[in-house]
C-alpha cells in the first residue's frame, strides 16, 4: 500500500515536468507575444520591442525555460505580465473559488447520480427507470454552457431568483451571499456530471442484480431496500470510484467553461485570460497547479478504490 | 437478429440530422439576410415578405404596405419606402426559427453551421481512429518495451484535462478548420488505443486463433478473418461515443470564440451570439443547443445499441 503511494508520487515529478515543458513549447511556437496583445494603437514598434525586452521575451527560448524552471525549484513562479503581481499570489486567490465550485459540483454529481441510479434500478424498465434514463441521456447530450445560458435566462433574468455572475454582490461578503452566487454554476456543472454517473451506475447495478450472491440474498428473504442498498450498491460503487478519478479532468475542463460564463473568479477564468494575453509565467503556473491537482486526484481515487475493495487492499 | 431499439433510434436521428444539414439549405426557402432595421430578432414562425431589389439588396419584414407607386417596408427601427419599379422579386415565406440580430434567417444558418460541426467531428474521429488503432496495434505487437512505453503515455494523456490544453492551443494559434480537426483528433485517440491493444492481446490467447496459427494459416489471413471482425464491434461503439465528445468539444471551443473563424456559422458560436441577446431572442441560443444535444444523444444511443449487440453475441 505504502509502496504504491510512493511509486505513484515518484512518477508525479516527470509527468508534471512533461506537461509544463509541453505547454512551454506550445506557447513558444505560437505567433505573437504579450507585447502584441496590449491593445493600444499608439504603441510604436520600438516601444513594443522595449516591452518584450522588459519581460525577458527577447532571450532565447531555452534560456527563458531554464531560468523559469530554476526559479520554480526555489519556489518562485515569477511575476504575471497581465496582473503585475506574483503568479503565486494570483493562483492562491483563484484556487479557493475553483475548489469550492468543483467540490460542490462533485458532491451534487455523486449524490444526485446515486439517488437517480438507485431509483432507476429499483424496478428496471419500470416508469421511474424510463424517465430517469431519458432524463440522464438528455442531460448527457446538452452542452454545459448552453444549460448555463438557459439557467441564467430563466432563474436570473426572468425570475430574478439567483445572480447571473460573480461570487459576491458588491459590498456583501456573507455566507448566504456566496451560496446564492454558487447555486447556478454548481448546479450546471453538477447536473451534467450526475447524468453520466447515473447512466453508468444504473448499468453496473443491473449487472450486480444478476449475480449469484444477489440470488442467494433474495432467497434468504431479505427486504428489498437491504438487497439494493447493502448487497448491490457496494460492489456497484467500485467502478464509480474509478469513474470519479477519470471524471476529474472533465470536471476541471468543465469548470473553465462554466467559470467564463458566470465570471466566477477561479482558475479557469485566470487560465483563459492568461492564454489570451500570452502571459507566459501565469500560463505555466496555472498548468503546473492544474497538473499536480489532477494527478493527486487520480491517486486519491486509486487509494479510495483500495479502501472500498478488500481484494485490492490485500494484494500488495 | 433484431437490432436494439436504441441503435435504430440513434442511427435514425443521426441520418436525419446529416441529411437535414447536407440538403436542407438547398431545399428550404431562405429568406436571406434582411436589413436589420426591419428584420432583426423576429420570433420563430413569423410570416415575412421578402423583397429582392434591383440593386441586389434584400428587404425582409413581417409588415409591408403598398400604394400605387411604392412599397413601404416597416420594422422596429424604421420604415423603408421603395419605388415599385426597383423591386426585382417579391415572395412570402416563414422564418421557422426566427431571425438573429443582424436580420439573418436562423434555420438555414443553423443547417449550414451543422455541416461544419459534423465535418469537423467526422474528420476528427477519423484522425483519432487512425492514431488510436495505430498506437494500439504497435503496443500489442511491438514487444514489451514498446507496449510499456506507449501504454504509459496513454495513461498520462488520459489523466489530463485535455480540453484545457486544447483551449490553450486554440487561444494561441487561432486555428483554421484543418488544425482544429488535427488537435481534436490528437486529443481523443487514447481510449481507442487501449481498446485495440486489449482486444488483440485477449484474442491472441483464444483457442480459435491459436488453432488457426497451428494450422499454418498465413498471418494476413488470420488478421482479416479473425482479428478485424472481432475488433470492429468494440471500436465502432467507442467511436460513436468519441464523436459525441468531439461535437461537444468543438462547440465548447467555438462558444469561447476559440474555434473555427467567426465568419463561418457554427453551433457553438451561434449559442454564444444568442446568449448576448437572450432576453430579446431566446430562440437564438436555444435551437443550436437543441441541435447539439440531438446529435450527441443520437451518437450515444448508437454507442449503447452497439454495446448491446456486442454483449448479446459475446
Image: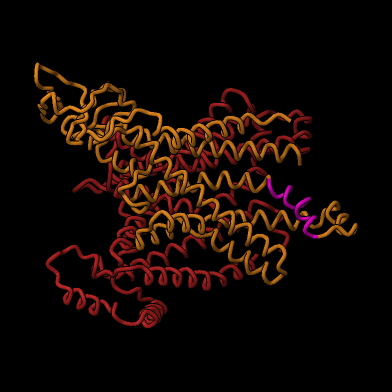
Chain colours: A red, B orange
Please give left or right for residue B255 compared with residue A173 in the image: right
x, y (%) of residue B84? 13, 23
B207 above or below B287?
A: below
Q: Residue furthest right?
A: B215
| Span colored in magenta | B219-232
A87 in the magenta segment = no
Q: Split into 4 quadrants, where in the image is the C terminus of chain B?
A: top right
Which residue is pictured at 16% across the width and 75% down the height? A47
B229 in the magenta segment = yes
Residue A195 visible in rendering: yes
State the residue in front, A8 or B133: B133
Please give left or right for residue B305 compared with residue A41 in the image: right
State the residue in front, A310 or B305: B305
x, y (%) of residue B94? 30, 23
Which residue is pictured at 47% across the width and 43% down the height? B118
Residue A74 visible in rendering: no
B290 above or below A76?
A: above
x, y (%) of residue B183? 46, 58
Amino acid at each position: 500500500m505504502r509502496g504504491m503511494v510512493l511509486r505513484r508520487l515518484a512518477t508525479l515529478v516527470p509527468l508534471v515536468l512533461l506537461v509544463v515543458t509541453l505547454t512551454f513549447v506550445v506557447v513558444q511556437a505560437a505567433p505573437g507575444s504579450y507585447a502584441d496583445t496590449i491593445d493600444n494603437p499608439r504603441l510604436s514598434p520600438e516601444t513594443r520591442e522595449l516591452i518584450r525586452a522588459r519581460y525577458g521575451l527577447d532571450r532565447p527560448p531555452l534560456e527563458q525555460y531554464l531560468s523559469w524552471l530554476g526559479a520554480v525549484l526555489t519556489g518562485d513562479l515569477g511575476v504575471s505580465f497581465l496582473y503585475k503581481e506574483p503568479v503565486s499570489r494570483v493562483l492562491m486567490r483563484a484556487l479557493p473559488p475553483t475548489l469550492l465550485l468543483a467540490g460542490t459540483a462533485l458532491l451534487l454529481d455523486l449524490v444526485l447520480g446515486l439517488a437517480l441510479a438507485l431509483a432507476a434500478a429499483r424496478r428496471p424498465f419500470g416508469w421511474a427507470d424510463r424517465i430517469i434514463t431519458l432524463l440522464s441521456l438528455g442531460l448527457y447530450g446538452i452542452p454545459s454552457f448552453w444549460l448555463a445560458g438557459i439557467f441564467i435566462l430563466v432563474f436570473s433574468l426572468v425570475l430574478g431568483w439567483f445572480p447571473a455572475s460573480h461570487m459576491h454582490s458588491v459590498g456583501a461578503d456573507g455566507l448566504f451571499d456566496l451560496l446564492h452566487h454558487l447555486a447556478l454554476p454548481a448546479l450546471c456543472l453538477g447536473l451534467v456530471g450526475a447524468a453520466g454517473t447515473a447512466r453508468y451506475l444504473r448499468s453496473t447495478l443491473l449487472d450486480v442484480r444478476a449475480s449469484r450472491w444477489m440470488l442467494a440474498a433474495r432467497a434468504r428473504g431479505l427486504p428489498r431496500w437491504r438487497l439494493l442498498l447493502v448487497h448491490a450498491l457496494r460492489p456497484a460503487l467500485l467502478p464509480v470510484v474509478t469513474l470519479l478519478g477519470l471524471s476529474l479532468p472533465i470536471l476541471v475542463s468543465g469548470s473553465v467553461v462554466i467559470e467564463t460564463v458566470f465570471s466566477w473568479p477561479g482558475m479557469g477564468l485566470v487560465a483563459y485570460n492568461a492564454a489570451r494575453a500570452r502571459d507566459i509565467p501565469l500560463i505555466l503556473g496555472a498548468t503546473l497547479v492544474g497538473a499536480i491537482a489532477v494527478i493527486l486526484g487520480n491517486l486519491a481515487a486509486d487509494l479510495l478504490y483500495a479502501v472500498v475493495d478488500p481484494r485490492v487492499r490485500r494484494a500488495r | 437478429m433484431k437490432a436494439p431499439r436504441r441503435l435504430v433510434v440513434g442511427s435514425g436521428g443521426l441520418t436525419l440530422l446529416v441529411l437535414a444539414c447536407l440538403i436542407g439549405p438547398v431545399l428550404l426557402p431562405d429568406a436571406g439576410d434582411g436589413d436589420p432595421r426591419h428584420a432583426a430578432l423576429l420570433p420563430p414562425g413569423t410570416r415575412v415578405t421578402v423583397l429582392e431589389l434591383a440593386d441586389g439588396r434584400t428587404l425582409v419584414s413581417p409588415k409591408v404596405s403598398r400604394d400605387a407607386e411604392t412599397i413601404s417596408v416597416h420594422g422596429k427601427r424604421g420604415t423603408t419606402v421603395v419605388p415599385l419599379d426597383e423591386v426585382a422579386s417579391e415572395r412570402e415565406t416563414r422564418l421557422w426559427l426566427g431571425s438573429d440580430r443582424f436580420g439573418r434567417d436562423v434555420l438555414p444558418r443553423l443547417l449550414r453551421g451543422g455541416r461544419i460541426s459534423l465535418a469537423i467531428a467526422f474528420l476528427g474521429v477519423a484522425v483519432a481512429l487512425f492514431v488510436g488503432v495505430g498506437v494500439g496495434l504497435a503496443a500489442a505487437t511491438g514487444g514489451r518495451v514498446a507496449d510499456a512505453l506507449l501504454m504509459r503515455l496513454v495513461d498520462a494523456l488520459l489523466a489530463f484535462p485535455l480540453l484545457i490544453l486544447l483551449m490553450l492551443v486554440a487561444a494561441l494559434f487561432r486555428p483554421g478548420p484543418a488544425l482544429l480537426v488535427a488537435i481534436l483528433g490528437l486529443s481523443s485517440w487514447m481510449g481507442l488505443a487501449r481498446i485495440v491493444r486489449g482486444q488483440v492481446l485477449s484474442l491472441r490467447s483464444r483457442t480459435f486463433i491459436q488453432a488457426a496459427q497451428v494450422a499454418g494459416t498465413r498471418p494476413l489471413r488470420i488478421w482479416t478473418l479473425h482479428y478485424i471482425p472481432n475488433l470492429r464491434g468494440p471500436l465502432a461503439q467507442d467511436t460513436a461515443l468519441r464523436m459525441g465528445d468531439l461535437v461537444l468539444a468543438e462547440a465548447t471551443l467555438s462558444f469561447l470564440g476559440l474555434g473555427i473563424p467567426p465568419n463561418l456559422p457554427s453551433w457553438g458560436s451561434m449559442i454564444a451570439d444568442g446568449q448576448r441577446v437572450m432576453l430579446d431572442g431566446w430562440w437564438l441560443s436555444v435551437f443550436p443547443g437543441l441541435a447539439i444535444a440531438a446529435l450527441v444523444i443520437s451518437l450515444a444511443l448508437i454507442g449503447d445499441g452497439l454495446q448491446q449487440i456486442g454483449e448479446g453475441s459475446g
